[in-house]
Image (spheres, rainbow, N blue to C red):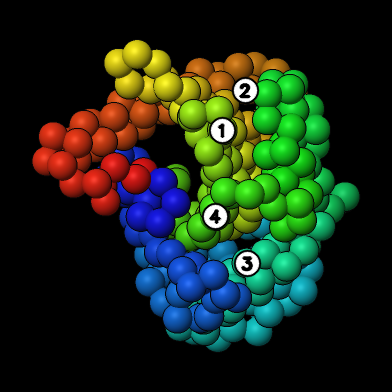
Amino acid sequence: FLVSPKKKEFDPTVESLGMIAEDGGNGSLEDFKGITLTNAKVMDKLYQKAAPGSDLNLSKDEIALFKKCKSHDEIENTLRQILLDRFRAYKTNGLEGIKPYARSKKEFSPGGELKGQIQAGKILPKYSPVFNKYAADYPHHKPEGAEESFFWVNSLIDDKPTIALVHRVGMPQDGGYVYMERHFYLSRSHNCLQGIGAALPVEDGAVVLYATRTSTDQVSGFGGSAKRGIGNKLMGGRMAQNFERAREVVAAAAAAKDMGNLRL
């Protein structure tokens, strides 16, 4: 789950992924060298003509950087640098360090949205208050036994490469395990995503519980309620399919006694 994510094996939208700062440090551009933008003509135009409220999640200064790009290579290199800068800001300052996205009217704060999601939760503060505080105040108040990892994911959504910066953190809890997956940056499609889960021991194995919240501008305005309902059904169906694929990956690893592949 932490050091060897198998997301590509059970999520068909994932094109590629890579670990960030595996040594626990501040990362480097080398960590992002595997990121490429396919559908180049469309993506080049998207980045060079980026503006507040466009299809991309960028701050005002990031938009200005892309407007200076003259080639596809420049766009990819600029993107890698921006991803590194966003990773370092988050790792140092947590949710407060996430730059807001420029919008046509009011800026959107992914950090504020993610913190609000944690604060709105009822179950985690009750059953794991220490982990809840760490999730809200990261990187402060790290509990004993907590481990973390970072990676990027490049998924194809609407035929366009969509980059996510992902933070995973987990810790043992009462004979089980509690964990969080936080997409603290998404280049497009969604604003941010956060999932909280737990693995609870039972007689013949473990029960996995997982809840996720996704923020997007695509269901606002007229008909927003209906769009959210449809989106929830689609997301729920996709999550169920991915969990079933993940179960198959774990089962195959267990049958082969491949402990490395038991990590998702």
Mark 4 in CB contact with mark 3 (< 8 angstroms): no
Is any atom of residue 90 visible in this view?
Answer: yes
Regarding mark 4 in the picture, which secondary structure is present there?
A: strand
Residue at mark 1: 173
The first of marks 2 and 3 along the sequence is 3
Amino acid carrying mark 4 in the image: Glu
x and y percent of residue 90 in the render?
70, 62
The first of marks 3 and 1 along the sequence is 3
Residue at mark 3: 87
Amino acid carrying mark 3 in the image: Phe
The 10 Å Cα crowd at callout 1, few under 14, some 14 to 19, many 20 or more, is: some
The first of marks 1 and 2 along the sequence is 1
Task: Name which residue lies at 30% across and 26% down.
Answer: 244
The first of marks 4 and 3 along the sequence is 3
The first of marks 2 and 4 along the sequence is 4
Residue at mark 4: 148
x and y percent of residue 4 in the render?
35, 55
User: Within the image, what quadrant is residue 205 found in?
Assistant: top left
